[in-house]
Amino acid sequence: MTKNLSLHNQHCRFFTTNQHEPTRTTKDSGVKVRGVCVVRGLLFLFTVLCSLFTVHAQDIEPSRLATIKYGTETEIAALIQSLRTEGADYLDDELITLIENTRNQKILNGVFAFFGDREKSGLEERAIRAIEERDDEANETVFSSIDYLGKVKSAKAVPALMELLDAQERRFMNAAFRAIGRAASSDKELADEAAEYLLDYYTEKDPGDDNRRDIIISIGATGSAKGVSLLSDLASNKDERIPLRLAALDALSKVGDPAGLDAVLECVGTNDPNVRSAAVAALGPFSGDNVDKAILDAFRDSYYRTRIAAAQAARERKLAAAVPYLKFRAERDDVPTVRDEAIRALGAIAGEEAIATLDGLFTERKNSDRVRLISAEMLMKSSSAKYLLRLIVEMDEARSKNQMPLYNGFLKVVGEAKIEGDTKEMENLTRRFLQSGGIMERLYGLDMAANNDLKNLSAEIKAQLNDRNESLVRKARRTAEKLGIEI
């Protein structure tokens, strides 16, 4: 910096001297010279600041790598939170290396949670080792390891989880029961084996009331038909505890075996509203006229959770016959959550009548922001090319009227959109955001460029690298890498 300022002084001295007549100066020429010096000084300062911002941006990644190598548990936790917020995965290999040789509870828990939430593999061996060497690990580390292995559906973790359950260490049993079904679900043969193991544990051993519900859920998570008989008996048993009946219905839905349908339909007609709504929600994976009729009847249920379940089941089955019911619920239901689920179901069905209904909900400016935003989201998922210009118009209208929650919602929708076919309008909007938008517009603009392969915007993307906002710089770098733009 000192060297740069010295050069600046030299430039100023040069431009304050008349080379041809070094001894002659006038008042006017002195003013002009000083003006030139000021302008050039400001330009020089701007160049220096830009270079400093660029250097700062280049230092971001080395700084993060240094944090992983030498940082405290608090510093690493803050870094992981930043990565989670950014949706970034470029430091995964370094984090995998980090936890191989540490027993720091907070670091391990943070990394396992970060990978588990994304269902990202790579930590299985370390997690299994934590279970096998649990006497030398903090309890929280073992819990987070078990949870991680379930989320990534690690088949090779099943033997370790069975060994843990056989040891009957009560402190870990809930977590192990929840994880083993998911872990086994990636392999059919192993799923059948795990289901049989859990059935035996439920009927022959004493898992305790605290664990029974977790076992039922885990049987469903395997996806194996081996447990359908027990699950059907539990769901249909009116003397059984309600939480277990609800868990059994959910498990039957996850398995989706036709042998469990009669039990589900029986529960649709029960007097208990919680069991009834759970049964309707469980109908999604099943088929048949009796199933369709049960779903349509559920839209008339006075219990709002049953109407929500009906919308979700119609969505899962893409049930076209449900569109008139969904239209009625989306426009008139007095429970906002029911309206939300009805709109999402219309988006999933996406037929002509469903799209027309969504169009009306989106363009009617008297509707609530919530209704318009979900409708816009569904339209952009089903007919993005057709509705992009309409969305831009409504977004600009919201901005002009200072309706910022609505504007920000539309901004998020367009930021996540992927256009099929001609991307010219998306490119124009993205350029506008990157050239003259605020931080949020530019962040979403980078998403739009990445989602729609807008390589023509390389200059606008690279320009973000000189910004002082670190999140923007990092996203610009990742966007450029994804699009193959040289930095």
Image (cartoon, rainbow, N blue to C red):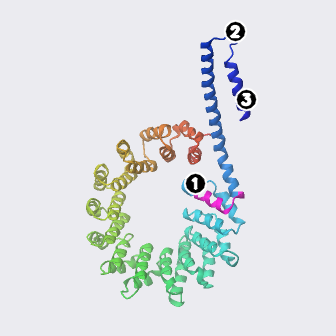
Numbered mark located on residue 170 in the image = none
Q: Three-letter amino acid code at disc 3?
A: Ser
Q: Position of residue 411 (x, y in %)?
A: 43, 48
Mark 1 crowd level (few <14, some 14–19, many ≥20, 10 Å Cα): some
Image quarter in which the N terminus is found: top right
Q: Which residue is mark 3?
A: 6
Q: Using residue 87 as the reference point, say whether residue 310 is left or right of it.
A: left
Q: Quadrant of residue 280?
A: bottom left
One can see residue 332 in this view: yes
User: Which of the two labelled residues, at mark 3 and mark 1, occupies the earlier sequence position?
Assistant: 3
Numbered mark located on residue 21 in the image = 2
Q: Using residue 137 as the reference point, say whether residue 224 is left or right of it.
A: left
Q: Is residue 428 magenta?
A: no
User: Could you give the CA–CA distance between mark 2 and mark 3, rounded to whole angstroms?
Assistant: 25 Å
Q: Which residue is mark 1?
A: 88
User: Which of the two labelled residues, at mark 2 and mark 3, occupies the earlier sequence position?
Assistant: 3
User: Which of the two labelled residues, at mark 2 and mark 1, occupies the earlier sequence position?
Assistant: 2
Q: Three-letter amino acid code at disc 2?
A: Glu
